Amino acid sequence: METISLKEQYLAFKAENPKKRIRDIATALNVSEAELLMTSLGESVTILENNFQDLLKDVTSLGYVMALTRNEYCVHERKGVYEKVSFSPHGGLVLGPDIDLRLFMSQWKLGFAVEDNLKSFQFFDGNGVAIHKIYLTDKSNAEVFPELVTRYRKAEQQSVAIRPTAAPAKPSLADEEIDVPAFQEAWKGLQDTHEFFGLLKKFNLNRTQALRLAPAGFAKQINADDFKAVVQSSADKQVPIMVFVGNHGCIQIHTGNVSRIVEMDVWFNVLDPEFNLHLRMDAVAQVWHVVKPSTDGDVNSLELFDSEGEMIVQLFGKRKPGLPELEEWREILATIPSGK
């Protein structure tokens, strides 16, 4: 019996399901998204040298683009220019007013230039799972794109074998093995929200376990509808917020107002000219209102998790280090009913 190539399977599936996105087709065919892209090498896809730091610095020359970062259940799209791109041994930063990214470059294993109906640069981990994508818009400097492709293309345009590896196990100590009083005191002593990750590591906690064991008044489980009401209220009152969506290789942040909130089937969407969010509400297993102390006063966030305890999206009021949190954000959160 003749075996059908992956390319043929992909084209046949696309023909039968023209509205399906490549990530969903990859899941249906039990392969990775990167493997599907590589079926078009030499046609609409070019594999790139693993020199992604220099490429990301050069993306600035494309001008106004759309940055896309997602995880399994949430897609974050932000238009703007890649500015203030820098790298250190700890990771990378893009710190423009519009494109705001935290980059964990050790996870970036594969890169492609894709030229179908839209031109883009797309980056993947070693499992072929998308980490970050950069799409040209009608305002981009399109003439720069082929120059960058030529500069960063790999000499050998051949498929790379994807050898999936399991994600590292999360901490799984039982509650009674945790020094809860010491953990709660350490939480209350936080000076900066960025210290929270170190706190989890120190006490060997996973994030939802930490929220469950939080000191009284610092973490409250709420409903998904409460989260939606907070976003809608932020839009109605035009209170600027920060929306964090990430994966193990990239965190993307929108800071500013949201305006057009649209629910479609299981999707909760923000559909604004510069910022789009697509969140699958049926995948949200837990929603928490979290309070972290800082030298600028308490910082309130909403955190959404899936059934595996993975963070889907995080919301803050707009804030800058050295300045207290917006009072208007606190007023919106004060309208949340008391606990789930």
Image (cartoon, rainbow, N blue to C red):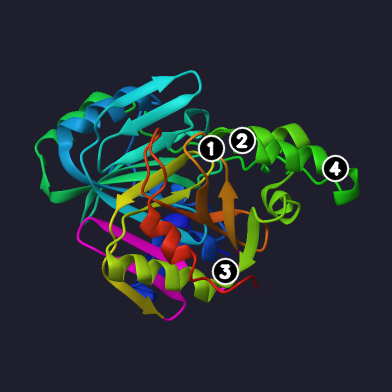
Report the residue that reaches farthest toward the top: 89
Mark 2 or mark 1: which comes first in sequence?
A: 2
How many marks on residues? 4
Q: Secondary structure at mark 1?
A: loop
Mark 4 or mark 1: which comes first in sequence?
A: 4
Q: Secondary structure at mark 2?
A: loop
Left or right: 98 as drawn, with respect to 305: left
**Mark pair 2, 1: CA separation:** 6 Å
Q: Residue at x 29, y 71 (%)?
A: 236
In this figure, which residue is indicated by the disc labeled 1?
Answer: 294
User: Which quadrant holds residue 179?
Assistant: top right
In this figure, which residue is indicated by the disc labeled 3?
Answer: 283
Give the x, y percent position of residue 322: 40, 33
In this figure, which residue is indicated by the disc labeled 2?
Answer: 190
Disc number placed over residue 178 in the picture, else none? 4
Observer-side mark, 4 or 1, equals: 1
Q: Nearer the viewer, residue 311 or 148?
A: 311
Quadrant in which the N terminus is drawn: bottom right
**Three-letter residue code for mark 3:** Ala
**Three-letter residue code for mark 2:** Leu
Q: Answer whether labels 4 and 2 touch (C-beta < 8 Å).
A: no
Give the x, y percent position of residue 335: 48, 71
Give the x, y percent position of residue 250: 45, 40
Dot 3: within a 10 Å radius of its alpha carbon, few (fewer than 14), some, or many (20 or more) residues?
some
Residue 280 inside the magenta-drawn segment = yes
Q: Residue at x 71, y 36 (%)?
A: 186
